[in-house]
Image (cartoon, helix red, strand yellow):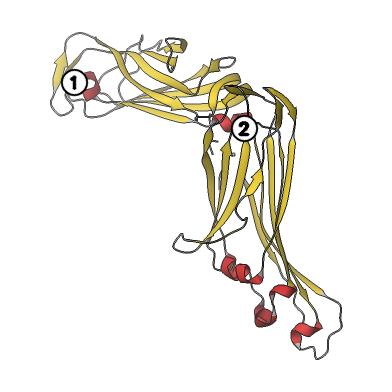
Amino acid sequence: MKFNPILILMLIVSILLSQASCKKKTYDDTPLASQWILPILKGNITPLTITTLKNKKLNLIVTGDDLGISTNSPTSSPIPLSFLNVKSDDIETNNLIESIVLDTCLIDVKITNNFPVTILAGTKIKFKQAGSLMEIMNFTLDNNLPMGQNKTFELDLSGKTIGYKIIVEIEELKIDAYSNETFSEDLTFDFLFKNVSVHELNIFTNQEYLNMRDTAEFDGSAIEFNEFDNKITDSTVNATFRYTSSNGLPINSYFQTYFLDDFNQVIDSIFTPNADMPGAEYDGTTFEKITESKGTVFVPKSRIEKIKNAKKIVYVLELNSKGYSGAFITIKKEQKFDLKIVGDLKLILNSNIFN
């Protein structure tokens, strides 16, 4: 499970079982504790998580058709050619983002030339702010790139302010003269955001954010009561799921965990209806106080029987910025939201179980 480009999740599943020997003929009254430590989730959401920029990728592919050159019939040009505004694509964050003030932001760029012609120096890439004529950055190829070769370089957006969407545009593409060539292959531009850190983030208020989901394998069949199964009732089971959170973000969160069977059908969930973790307290647009939340859910044996059939576990975190004043609200880089989910199952095995 991976809380993505945008949340860091750790999953530990271990099973510990202690049994009394079946050869015993008599029992004392001292309880014997058996315990399963079910999935433990720990993670945090930071301003960087919300931007979804970490390890963000973009791939721009230019074909002969994009240049108006045939991809299936040989053509020639006795002179070098220049093409303007060849292709563009968007790098989006999400609908919570109003603007991002970057501390650091490096972008790896790789150009792979599979065209049957040399890409000439002077080819230009531009980064623009969506909805604005403002140019964030541009890069000009300073050396020719022969056919069949690639070139990598690094762009630096550190200290820049960007919005929810950046437009990457191949503003000008220059190619050398060629003779009797077919442009059946592509020219590719690969972009990877790395070493990203955020100084501050402005998010829109009263917005829903897409659910953050992660799926992991789960072997519920390991939960066994063995020969004591039919003698164990809800009264002998002490099973709970607990959550604690410390929310320093102006974002309300709702957490749920689902158990799935072999057919990816939900067979049970933990919280009813959800674990509710309100956002931090703000005085208008000024941060005031972290909000602490916690809760406990009792799990009866009947639900444990369902969980035993699970093959996957799905974590769902819903976020929204509802209930805050103003058009947008600022998050500083120091603010974060810590979340911990712990599940345990304890059985009290005493003499009356075996009688």
Looking at the picture, does residue 217 appear above or below residue 238? above
Give me the residue at 39% from left, 29% from top.
59
Dividing the picture into quadrants, the one containing residue 68 is top left
Name the residue at 58% across, 65% down.
Answer: 307
Percent coordinates x, y for residue 16 in the rendering: 71, 67
238 on left or right of 256: right
Residue bearing the label numbered 1: 69
Amino acid type of the residue tagged 1 in the rendering? Ile
Residue 345 shows in the view: no
Query: Residue 323, which numbered label?
Result: 2
Label 2: element kind:
loop
Q: Quadrant of the C terminus?
A: bottom right
Q: Residue 247 occupies which quadrant of the picture?
A: top right
Q: Earlier in the sequence, mark 1 or mark 2?
A: 1
Kindly identify which numbered label has been placed on residue 193.
none
State the separation of the CA atoms marked 1 and 2.
Answer: 54 Å
The reply to whether residue 154 is visible in this rendering is: yes
The amino acid type of the residue labelled 2 equals Gly
Front-most of residues 224 and 248: 248
The image position of residue 263, as x and y in percent, is 44, 62
Q: Position of residue 99 (x, y in %)?
A: 55, 20
Q: Can you say whether 250 is above or below 348 in the image?
A: above
Q: Return the residue nearer the eye: 177 or 270.
A: 270
Name the side, left or right, on which 289 lies relative to 177.
right
- Give the x, y percent position of residue 126: 41, 14
Whether 267 is drawn above or below 349: the answer is above
For disc 1, the neighbor class at 10 Å (few under 14, some 14 to 19, many from 20) is some
Of tags 1 and 2, which is closer to the observer? 2
**Residue at 20% across, 8% down:** 79
